[in-house]
């Protein structure tokens, strides 16, 4: 096994993990938690504990990701994570951004603040306010959703860095 693939977690999850999901219709616990750790390493223990309350973590992850795979549309996919499994919007959107990068982008406070948007918690507001704004910015700049997300996040990070050093 080539363990070096875990070094560049973003490349691994947007490549091999996403491909595995599309082929099998679900993720393994290891694949799923690579997404969790990529988004927010600090959340991994809390999420593992939450998922283990429903049975084995591996079985619960398979069930969740099968439900996402089988959901009819983007709204339903997000609802699986927000309503059925009670994930927060940032984590739910991160998971779906990996699995469906042309339909979702990561809802993150840094990106939200760069777009001057208010905090959102619902599927409806994600699709009415947040996603269309990122799509508009991406289209205007000739970028993919993922590229736009990285640019906006990076700009926020740089501004914080500048503030720290000023």
Image (cartoon, rainbow, N blue to C red):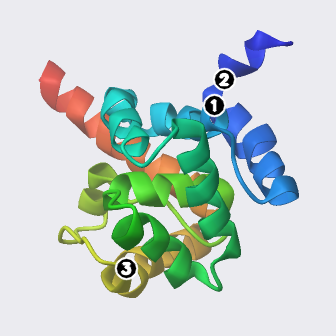
Locate the C terminus by quadrant: top left
Is residue 101 among what the camera can see?
A: no
In the picture, measured across the screen, residue 11 lies left or right of residue 43, that is right
Rendered location of residue 108, percent (x, y): 34, 53
Is residue 155 among what the camera can see?
A: yes
Sequence-wise first label, 2 or 3: 2
In the figure, 156 relative to 125: above or below?
A: above
43, 53: nearer the viewer: 53
Q: Residue at x 62, y 72 (%)?
A: 103
Q: Residue at x 46, y 81 (%)?
A: 132
**Helix, strand or loop under label 2:** loop
In the figure, 129 relative to 152: above or below?
A: below
Sort mark 2 into few (<14), some (14-19) or many (20+) by Cα contacts within 10 Å.
few
Q: Residue at x 60, y 57 (%)?
A: 63
Q: Residue 139's quadrant in the figure?
A: bottom right
Q: Are marks 1 and 3 in contact (CB under 8 Å)?
A: no
Sort mark 1 into few (<14), some (14-19) or many (20+) by Cα contacts within 10 Å.
few
Q: Nearer the viewer, mark 1 or mark 3?
A: 1
Rendered location of residue 141, percent (x, y): 58, 67
Q: Are marks 2 and 1 in contact (CB under 8 Å)?
A: no
Sequence-wise first label, 1 or 3: 1
**Residue on which disc 1 sits:** 30
In the figure, 22 relative to 47: above or below?
A: below
Rendered location of residue 71, percent (x, y): 63, 78
In 3D space, how far apart are the residues under numbered discs 2 and 1 (Cα atoms)?
Answer: 15 Å
In the picture, measured across the screen, residue 133 lies left or right of residue 58, that is left
122, 30: nearer the viewer: 30
**Residue on which disc 2 sits:** 8
**Residue on which disc 3 sits:** 123
In 3D space, how far apart are the residues under numbered discs 2 and 3 (Cα atoms)?
Answer: 30 Å
In 3D space, how far apart are the residues under numbered discs 1 and 3 (Cα atoms)?
Answer: 27 Å
């Amino acid at each position: 096994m080539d363990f070096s693939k875990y070094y560049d977690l973003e490349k691994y999850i947007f490549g091999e993990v996403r491909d595995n999901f599309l082929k099998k219709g679900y993720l393994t616990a290891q694949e799923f938690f690579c997404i969790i750790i990529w988004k927010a390493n600090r959340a991994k223990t809390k999420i593992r504990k939450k998922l283990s309350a429903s049975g084995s973590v591996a079985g619960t992850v398979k069930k969740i990701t099968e439900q996402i795979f089988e959901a009819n549309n983007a709204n339903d996919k997000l609802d699986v994570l927000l309503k059925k499994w009670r994930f927060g919007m940032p984590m739910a959107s991160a998971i779906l951004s990996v699995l469906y990068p042309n339909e979702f982008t990561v809802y993150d406070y840094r990106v939200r603040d760069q777009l001057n948007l208010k905090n959102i918690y619902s599927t409806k507001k994600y699709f009415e306010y947040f996603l269309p704004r990122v799509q508009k910015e991406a289209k205007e700049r000739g970028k993919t959703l993922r590229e736009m997300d990285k640019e906006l996040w990076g700009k926020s990070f740089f501004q914080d860095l500048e503030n720290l050093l000023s």
